[in-house]
């Protein structure tokens, strides 16, 4: 092999120190304070370094990456799995030298790093998802507090954090105990269809510790709802900045967002403007919110991945080959958040009775299990997303009947081939 990058450096990053390896020189170490990072940048300039490779270790790399990039270095963030050291030779000093050597020979691949407004948007979106998970935890706490007082609302209402459930909980915390009065706080459709069951569920055994636990969980849930709303405001501001406040109001009917709908004005129009009017919501399972989630992880320029195979491999959705002899090892790869989003969408598609992706997934689930089926459906959806955004190929959902007709044609073709091999006549 020949070296293709000269004047290169490798950096191993830790919580307290960073180690910089240069070719033909001793390893230098620096602290992790901002002033230390500035000194490290000056050290690289002094040695006429032009390109730097570093591992994506936790979040320790973020500030150093930004400083080096702002100082004009060609910075490569690489996956730690690409820089594994020879067994028995694992130290921070040897790691940075090994990274430098691999980088100089062109054996490392650059990771995707969000920059500018895209990085800011991703930060707000990930923070919003964290708040949603925390709020869901406190919904479970409210359910537990109710059941401990034998208030069986979770068995009657599909969501206790819906309009009817929250109205009842607020009244209980205000001192109301009469089931009939609590029932009148519910939505009219709930009163019409479930009034008898709700009255029975509200005949509880109230305790002071149960009310206290319910109050704590309710207040925590409301706190995270306010946090989510603040994140929505920041997301809307960043989207408007990216689009230059020139987004037209989208007049078309958009897909309904059933859960965790963000309070962002004209979200559909904002996303269409970002992608040049290419609408990802024509794909099954994708709403404006899930589209925003995907965008926050991948950006609008999907040409960074040369093909759909590169894209699905980066998402962790490509089938792996990890066989040894007769054994088929199940080697779990790292799962980027974007890949997890496509997996969640695939899970919902498996329940669909009218979409061909659902029929494909259920057929595969019956033969190879749910995990492989979810991964395969997620990959098909990611391929269609890449084709739409890169090549502009419109997706047309032809339904389960069309998919089953194709399967019948394949079976007929196979039977004809088999009959020909056996010298039999196919009618």
Image (spheres, grey):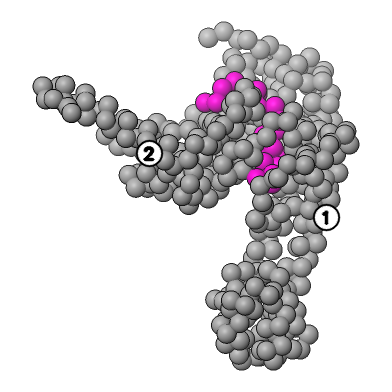
Residue 306 among magenta residues:
yes
Across and down, in percent, residue 234 comes to 83, 48
The residue to which callout 1 is attached is: 230
Quarter the C terminus occupies: top left
Question: Relative to 223, is 69 above or below?
Answer: above
Question: Relative to 369, is 180 above or below?
Answer: below
In depth, the one of 258 and 39 nearer the eye is 258
Q: Residues within 10 Å of mark 2 (few under 14, many from 20)?
A: some
Residue 218 among magenta residues:
no
Residue lying furthest front:
427
Which image quadrant is residue 267 in? Answer: top right
**Prevailing secondary structure class for the magenta stretch in the rendered image:** helix
Which image quadrant is residue 312 in? Answer: top right
- Asked whether the beta carbons under mark 1 and mark 2 sit within 8 Å of each other, the answer is no
The residue to which callout 2 is attached is: 404
Q: Is residue 280 left or right of residue 90?
A: right
Across and down, in percent, residue 112 comes to 66, 30
Q: Residues within 10 Å of mark 1 (few under 14, many from 20)?
A: some
Q: Which residues are magenta?
A: 287-309
Q: Nearer the viewer, mark 1 or mark 2?
A: 2
Across and down, in percent, residue 58 comes to 66, 42
Image point (58%, 45%), residue name: 285
């Amino acid at each position: 092999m020949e070296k293709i990058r000269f004047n290169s450096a490798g950096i191993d990053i830790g919580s307290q120190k960073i180690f910089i390896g240069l070719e033909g020189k001793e390893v230098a170490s620096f602290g992790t304070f901002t002033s230390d990072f500035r000194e490290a940048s000056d050290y690289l300039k002094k040695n006429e370094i032009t390109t730097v490779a570093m591992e994506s270790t936790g979040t320790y790399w973020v500030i150093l990456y930004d400083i080096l990039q702002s100082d004009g270095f060609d910075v490569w963030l690489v996956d730690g799995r690409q820089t594994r050291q020879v067994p028995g030779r694992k130290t921070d000093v040897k790691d940075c030298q090994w990274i430098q050597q691999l980088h100089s020979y062109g054996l490392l691949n650059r990771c995707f790093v969000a920059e500018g407004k895209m990085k800011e948007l991703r930060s707000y979106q990930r923070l919003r998802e964290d708040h949603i998970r925390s709020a869901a935890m406190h919904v479970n706490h409210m359910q537990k507090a109710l059941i401990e007082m034998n208030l069986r609302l979770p068995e009657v209402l599909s969501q206790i954090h819906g309009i009817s459930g929250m109205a009842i909980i607020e009244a209980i915390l205000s001192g109301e105990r009469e089931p009939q009065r609590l029932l009148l706080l519910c939505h009219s459709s709930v009163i019409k269809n479930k009034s008898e069951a709700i009255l029975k569920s509200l005949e509880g055994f109230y305790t002071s510790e149960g009310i206290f636990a319910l109050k704590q969980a309710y207040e925590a849930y409301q706190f995270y709802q306010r946090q989510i709303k603040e994140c929505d405001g920041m997301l809307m501001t960043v989207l408007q900045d990216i689009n230059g406040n020139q987004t037209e109001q989208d007049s078309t009917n958009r897909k309904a967002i059933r859960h965790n709908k963000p309070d962002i004005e004209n979200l559909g129009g904002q996303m269409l403007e970002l992608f040049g009017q290419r609408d990802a919501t024509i794909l099954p399972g994708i709403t404006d919110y899930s589209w925003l989630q995907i965008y926050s992880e991948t950006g609008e320029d999907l040409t960074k991945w040369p093909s759909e195979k590169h894209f699905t491999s980066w998402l962790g959705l490509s089938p792996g080959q990890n066989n040894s002899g007769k054994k088929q090892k199940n080697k779990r790869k790292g799962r980027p958040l974007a890949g997890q989003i496509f997996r969640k969408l695939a899970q919902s598609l498996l329940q669909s009775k009218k979409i061909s992706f659902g029929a494909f997934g259920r057929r595969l689930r019956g033969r190879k299990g749910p995990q492989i089926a979810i991964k395969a459906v997620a990959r098909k959806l990611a391929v269609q997303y890449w084709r739409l955004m890169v090549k502009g190929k419109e997706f047309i959902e032809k339904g389960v009947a069309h998919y089953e007709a194709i399967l019948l044609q394949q079976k007929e073709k196979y039977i004809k081939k088999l009959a020909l091999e056996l010298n039999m006549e196919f009618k």
